[in-house]
Structure formats: structure tokens, C-alpha cells
Amino acid sequence: MTKTKPARYGMAIDLDRCTGCGACMVACAVENNVPPARPEATPRTGITWMRVYQISNGAESPDTRAAFIPILCQQCGHETPCAAVCPQEAVEVDPATGIVDQMPQRCLGCRYCMTACPYHARYFNWWDPRWPAGMEKTLNPDVATRMRGVVEKCNFCHGRLHAARTRAAAEGRSELRPGEYVPACVEACPARAIVFGDLNDPESELARLARDGHSFRILERLGTEPKIYYRTERAWVREAAHA
Amino acid sequence: MPEVETKLMPRGVRRCASRQFLLWILPWCVLLAFGLYGAGLCLVKGLNQTNMDNRFAFGLWIFLDLTVIALGAGAFFTGFLLYILKKSELKAVINSAVVIGFVCYSGAVAALLVDVGQPLRFWFTFWHPNVHSMLTEVTFCITCYLTVLAIEYVPIILKNRKLRQVPSFLVFEFELHKLMPVLAGVGTFLSFFHQGSLGGLYGVLRGRPFAFREGFAIWPSTFFLFILSAAAAGPAFILLTTWLVSKISRQQLVRPEVMRLLGRISGILLLPYILLKTIDTLVWMNSTAPAHGFAAHEFYARKPFGVWILFAEIVVCGLAPALILLRRRMRESAGWLVFASALVCAGITLNRFVMTVQTLALPTLPFDPFLSYLPSWQEVATFLAVIAYGVLTYSLSFRYLTLFPQEKDLSC
């Protein structure tokens, strides 16, 4: 069997391009079988693996400016806070991809990982998942639905990774080609604000963007080595994000 | 009082009439039933019955768990002092301490089972343990220690006047009693670890700079602070409950020197705890938090969590009771003893509140708002059910078992 090179998948999000349209959030929910929010759900009890925050420069009109910061699991690579605290190894960092995986089938629902996550990018199923009649036909067969009482989060569309690997294996390849596997949010963004790739590949566009002087990682000083890079040339946005 | 009930009570002690006792336990039974209903709703319908959310993922119940486990530490520490360090005066309160410990730990475990999203998967932690998680250590140690407490509780039950008439029970109780020093040792070992791990639960949270602490090897400083604070609070809580039971039952239960000894032990442990807590806070303010990009004063800029909370915890509920309890003259006064013990227990409760609730209320993302959380009635009801369960178990134990061996002599 051919040994494959380990990847370190990551993302770069251009905040100057993001319009806050929310297409990434919708694509993410559809791709990953996230159920529609219950009528009694609040912004703090809904499930949004990707969540777009709106920030403002705080100035009076006409100088008011807004920016949008999509926050998803930052796939921390060092002392991954959620993986370190989970009491039953329901969270693990895949050494082959660098993706932080969540196993809802093993999750106790203690929510310690949610407390540990600095990005608040983990979501608890407060209700049983339910789809309106007929909508269950739109479910993605590559992704298992989750039950009430377990935690879930962004996994860079793991179903797509599996599908890409299966296709590659069918063609006799052990490595994925660049661009062969991209998460749904990347595909859906109409402004092409999200770039996905392998940080271990120095030639990739992602690696180039990560090295860009205008790129930064949120809460980098916590030392968790997140793999999501944000880029902006606006000073006030960098300041608001403590870049 | 019906003769059948009198025969169940310890000899030579006075207890209130059956009717009066029923009137005492009735409201607690109602509260327990109400709480069980609330907890049942959470188990059947899910945690959507609570006001916790994705941001306030821990709430009232975790605060309850941390607090009662700290207050219940009197069981292990009194056992350690009595059986290992041979402080024989504490024999006067050891049975009461065991019952308090059992009630606190079993109540906490019950609340935890309601608190998790998938209670039927509780055994997963034993099957797939993550040895790096503080919660794994807490789960293992609490489960083992609750078993130890249950074994320690059995001989107290078997000493009941009626049960003693069964010869095999008497033999079993005698044999169990010989095990007590071993159980005390095991209990102390387990307690040191889980009390510490409860502190470590928050101390390791790199993503929560308000709670994160550097430490020694794999243990953050909160690991050691929780052990010391629980050891200090345990005797104070035993003192407080003994005084309270004495007032309610109108009986003298222990000699004053036992109360003074409990107070002194609490004071001796509290002073180094406060000293270390102060050093830890200063290190965190000047080194740990700034190294992670946070100015400590920002954490206290959001109302109602101002600097007052730190002052209340360290000075009012820490230094002040420590100084009271360490002064012989003040310990001579029952009023000061009880007042200082109440302050110690309040301080530990406040510390656990700060660690659980304030930590989650403060945002980590720079553009995130400060959050508030108010528990739902189901959460409050479950909380009250644990309290009611504790009061009922203790009341029944006090009425039918010998919790204070000196009581008989003192009532003569």
C-alpha cells in the first residue's frame, strides 16, 4: 500500500471580500444535514457550524463601516482544547488531515468541549432533529444525522473528503489532487472569499495567503495553532479582531 | 410517640414527636417531588428544558456539583484526621461527616446524570477514557469515592437499634469497622485527586483566559487550590451543620472542644489557601492573562462581576474567617465560630460560582458580547431536589442512627 503524505487542511477567508450574504452558512447546513431550527430556538441554541458575525467600526453615519467575520471550527493543531478535555475520546485530531473530528456516536453530551472552545464553534443538539415533511428527501446520504443530546461542529465536510478519497482510490490514486476536495462553504461563496487547501503544500494558494502580511489568525496568542486564516487590509477590522 | 418508632431510635437520646418530624419532612418531600418532576422533564424532553445554550454550556447544575463536592469534603478530611492522623476527638462527628459526604456526592452524581445529554452513555467514559481529560479523572474518582462513602455509611446504618438485633448484621458491621482506616486512606487518596481535578477542569481551559492557569507538570494551579480550599471548607461545613442540627433538634450534640477543634483545623488550612490564592491571582493578572493577549482588569469591567467579587472571596470570606478561627479567644465563642464557618462556606461557594458562571459569561472572541444566563424553573427545581434529598437523608439518619456518639452522654 502506498504511503500518503499527511495533509494539513486549512482555510483563508478574505474579510474584505465577504459581504455577509450567509450563503456559506446555508450551504454548510444543507451539506451536513443540519436540521432547521425549532421555533423555540434562540440564536444561542441553534446549530450553525459556520456563523457569520457582523462587526462595526462604531463610527456615526456616514462614516459607519461594517465587516463580516465567518467563524467556524478553527481546527486547532496544538493542544486542541476540545480534544484535550473530552472525557471519552469523542474528539480526535486526524493526523492524516489535521482535521478535528467529532464522533457524535460516542459523545456523552457533557458539553465540556463547548466550554473549552475559545471560538464558540461547537453546537449542542438541544432538540431531536426534525425536518418538515418532504424535506427529508433532500438529506445528504453521505452524512449521518445527529441525535438529541450530542455535540457537533464543522469537520470541513468530512462526507466530501470521503467521497473524494473513494473517487481517487477508484482511479488508483492514493493522493488527492489540489481542488479535488473542497468544503461546501468554499464552493457556495459568491465572492470567492474562502480559499481551502493544504497548508503543508507551500505552493498552494492557501499557503501563500497564510504568509500574506495582511493575514492573521483569531486568538493566535492562545497558542492553539488554528488553521483558519483571516485576511483584511482594513486596520479597524484587524483591531476589532485583535489581530 | 409510637413504640414501634421509639424502638428504631438510638437509646438515651431525645427526638421530637412523630407528628412534629412529619411536619418537618413534609415540605422537603414536596420540594423533592417537584424537583424530580423538573428533572424528569429534562430527561424525557431533553436539555431544551433548561436555559443553558451553546455559549452557556454549563450552568446551575455544574455550580451545584462543584459546591456540594467541596462542602462534602469534610467526610474525607475528617476520616483522614481521625483514622490516619489519630485525632480521636473527631470521632464525635465522623458519622455525621460520612452522611454529609454521602449526601453531597450522591446528590452531585444524580445532578450530573440529568446534566449530560446522553445519560445512558455514562459508561462510555469508563470504556473509552481520555486519560488527558480532567473530567475523566473526576468521573473515575467520584464514582470510586461514592462507593467508598456508601461502604462507610453501611456500618452506621447497621448500628441502628433494631438492625443490631440481627446477629449477622452485627458481625458484618464489626468487620466493616475494621476496614475503616483502609477506607479512610483510599477515600483521602481519591478525594485529593478529584477535588484537584475539579479545579483542573477550569484551570486547563486555554480557551478561557479568565480561568486558565499555569501550574506544575500537567496540573494547573487551580488543581492544588481546589484541594486546599475543599479541605478547609469541609470541617467548617461540618461545624456549621452540627450547630444547625443542634439548634433545630434543641440537643447538645458534641462537646464545645470538638467544635473548636473543627474551627481551628479549618483556620489552619484556610490561611495558606488564601495566601496561595492571592499569589496565584497576582501571577495570573501580571503574567498568564497578558501572555494570552488579555488584560486582567478587562475581566472585572463587566457588571456585575467587578473587583468586589475578588475582594469578597479573598478578604471577606477568606482572610477574615481565617484570622477569626486562628484566634483561641474567638474560638471560645460559639457565635464567632459559627459566623466564621459560615463565611468560609460562603467563600468556597463564591469561588465555585466564579469558576463556573463568571468564566462562561466573559467572552473570549474580541467581537463577542458579555453574556447572561438565568436558570429555568426545571434547573432550579432539580437544584432544590438535591438540597431536599440531602436534608431528608440527613434528617432520617439523625433520627434513627447514631450520628453524634457524644449526644447520649451530653443529654444525661
Image (cartoon, grey):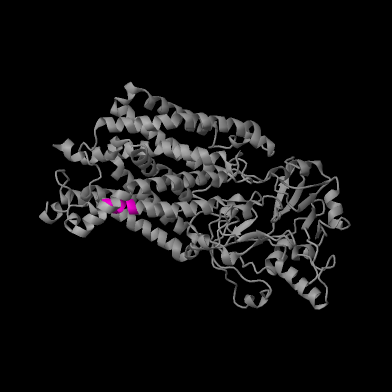
The outermost residue toward the right is A203
What residue is drawn where x is 84% and y is 46%? Answer: A214
- Give the magenta part as a residue range: B151-155
Q: Is residue A163 left or right of residue B281?
A: right
Q: Main secondary structure of the magenta part?
A: helix
Q: Quadrant of residue B327?
A: top left
Question: What is the x, y in percent for residue A199?
Answer: 81, 56
Q: How many marks?
A: 0
The one nearer the camera, B80 or A142, is B80
Name the spot of residue A152 as percent of width and height, x first.
Answer: 62, 62
Asked whether residue A231 appears in the rendered view, the answer is yes
Residue B54's place in the image compared with B223, above or below, is below
Taking the magenta stretch, the answer to whether it contains residue B154 is yes
Image check: B218 left or right of B97? Answer: right
Residue A5 in the image: state x and y as whole percent: 80, 63
**Does residue B380 show up?**
no
